[in-house]
Structure formats: C-alpha cells, structure tokens
Amino acid sequence: MGRLITLEEFILKSQNRFPGAKGELSQLLRDISLASKVISKEVKRAGLANILGVHGTTNVHGETVKRLDLFANEQLIHALSRSGSVCMIVSEESEGVIRLRHSSAKYIVYMDPLDGSSNTDVNGSIGTIFSIFQRLSHPGDEPGLADLLQPGHQQVAAGFVLYGTNTKLLYTTGLGVSEFTLDASLGEFFLSEQEIRIPKRGDILSVNEGNRDSWSAPLREYWHHVRFVEPLTSRYIGSMVSDIHRTLVAGGVFMYPESAKLPQGKLRLMYEANPMAWLIEQAGGVATTGTRRILDVEPTDIHQRCPVYVGSPETMDVLLRFLRNR
C-alpha cells in the first residue's frame, strides 16, 4: 500500500496543472474542507449537543430551518470570510447575497450548507454542496448581478461533503472527480479514489415516487416502463448528496422532475443542480433538465429552480427517449 495523500497535498499538486495559478482557489477549497470537519464533528454529536430539531424559522424557500442548518451555514460563512478570496456568498439559508468585506476578491461561492437536513432527526445521512465561480467584473468595481448569474459551465470548482458512515469530500476543478475520506482520529482528509467514473449502465432509480400522480404523462410512462418492462430497483434517501453519491458509485438515474405542483422542479439551479451536474459529467455521466444540458441553463435568479435528471449515460438514454415525447 502506497503512502496516503492528504487533501491539502492533492490540491497543491493539482494547482500546478493550471499555469498562472496563484493559490487562491486552493486556499478556498482548504477553507471549505476545514468547515466541513467542524460540521462533521457536530453532526456526530448533534443529539448529545441538543442541536437537533427545528429552529422555529423558515428559509427563503419556506422550508423549516433546523438548528444544524444554521450551525453549518455559520461555519461555512466564517471559513469563507477568513481567506480573503471570496467577495460574495449565496446560501440556501439566506434570502439575499452575503457580501464580504473583501469586495475585490476573485471568487463567488454558492452553497447548500446542510442538504437533506430533514434526515437529521432520524439519523439519516446529510451533506454540504458547494459551487465556485470566478467573478467577471474588474476587481476595482463592486461585484454585481452579472457576476452572480453565470451558467454552470463557467464553474471553476464544485463538490460536496457527505456526512454518513464516513465523512467524504468529492470535488472537481474540471480535471475529473476525486474523493477524500476523513480520518477523524487525525483530523485529515485522505485521497480514497481518484478519477471516479460512473458506471455506463445502472439498475437503480432514485426519485420520490410519491409525487408521480403529478408528473407528466411521458414521465409516468417511463416509470411504468422501469417498473414492469425493464425493471430498475428503487432507492431514495431524500438527501441529494447521498442519492448523487450512490448514483456516482453504483450508477442508475437520479431525478427530481417538474410536476403539476412544482412546474420548475424543486431543486435550486445554482447550488444544487449546477455543482452536481458538473460532478456527474466529469465522471462520464449525463445531466439534463429533460430538455437541455443543466450546465447551459442561463440563470435569472440566485434561488432559481430547475428539473434535474442525472445518471449513467446508457440508463439516461432510456429516460430521455420518453421525455422527448412531451
């Protein structure tokens, strides 16, 4: 067995593959990993620390806020504020843009601090999602809407942290998807898999089937097809991080489609769909809204929603044949 490679070593080595890189993005990724270690520790002791349960407020989407949501949000904002490389943050937990004192800084971070937090009270797996863009405006100018509303293919880094049996961090900078596992005894993330490839075909369908009565007719026909004609196994955790991680490892299809109740879908484009779509594509998969590539959607709002269909290329081909009938 070779020497273990830490996340920091891997980031610094990868930085050398980008001519002219000055280390700001590397530092930013290390800051996110540091915050995730703190969040992971708190998640493990959440029941004892009395921070499970609801906070008594709702976020911008009208969803009940958990105490752990706020803790994760605060830790990430604190970590990102320290580096001096971030000028603006957009969080699922905040209605507006969080402008940091470093207004000339290079990067903008979108984040879902604690995805799947409804799972915390039942000891289910949860996660953190992040997406990083480089500002378009001149550093001497105040960053604005054009910097925020960039399509997903302009991301410079994206990833997620999964707080489960192990704490895992997966990220990409456009050079494939790498996975790191936290050794809690040492407080270090170590490289556990490099250049993850999603299976070309998978036998798992991950979707909230309780909503199918409000799906379009072609989507209901697809569901019938994969139940009774070419059956897929149903697996749905209710945390996008957990479901996407399983899809990357085992293959298949994850989807949160549009419906009569949610015509634009439920998932947010900028800090859920875009980062996950880039990870899936970097691993050799397909990520679409059902009508177009997710990473090509031109955003109009920081909290914009969109339908999400991602997964193994051959398994997705079957789904897309049905969706084209709409």
Image (cartoon, rainbow, N blue to C red):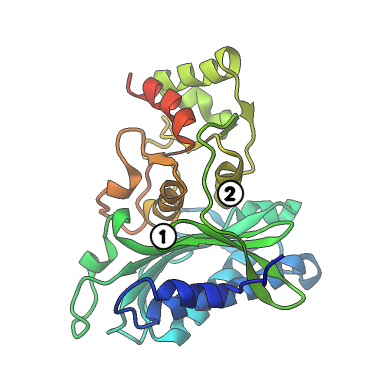
SS of the residue at dot 2? Answer: helix
Query: What residue occupies the far top of the structure in this picture?
Result: 229
Query: What residue occupies the far right of the structure in this picture?
Result: 48
Q: Quadrant of residue 175?
A: bottom left
Q: Which quadrant of the rendered structure holds the C terminus?
A: top left
Q: Amino acid at mark 2?
A: His
Q: Amino acid at mark 1?
A: Leu
Name the front one of labels 1 and 2: 1
Q: Name above or below for residue 251 compared with residue 18.
A: above
Q: Which residue is mark 1?
A: 175
Of residues 173 and 121, which is closer to you in this image? 173
In this orientation, does residue 130 appear?
no
**Residue drawn at the location 72% of the way across and 70% of the way down:** 183
Q: Which residue is mark 2?
A: 245
What's the distance in space between the residues labelled 1 and 2, CA to CA?
18 Å
**Residue drawn at the location 54% of the way across and 38% of the way down:** 199
Q: Position of residue 321 (x, y in %)?
A: 38, 21
Of residues 58 and 92, which is closer to you in this image? 92
**Residue drawn at the location 64% of the way across and 52% of the way down:** 118
Report whether 293 appears left or right of 200: left
Mark number, residue 241: none
Q: Name above or below for residue 179 compared with residue 305.
A: below
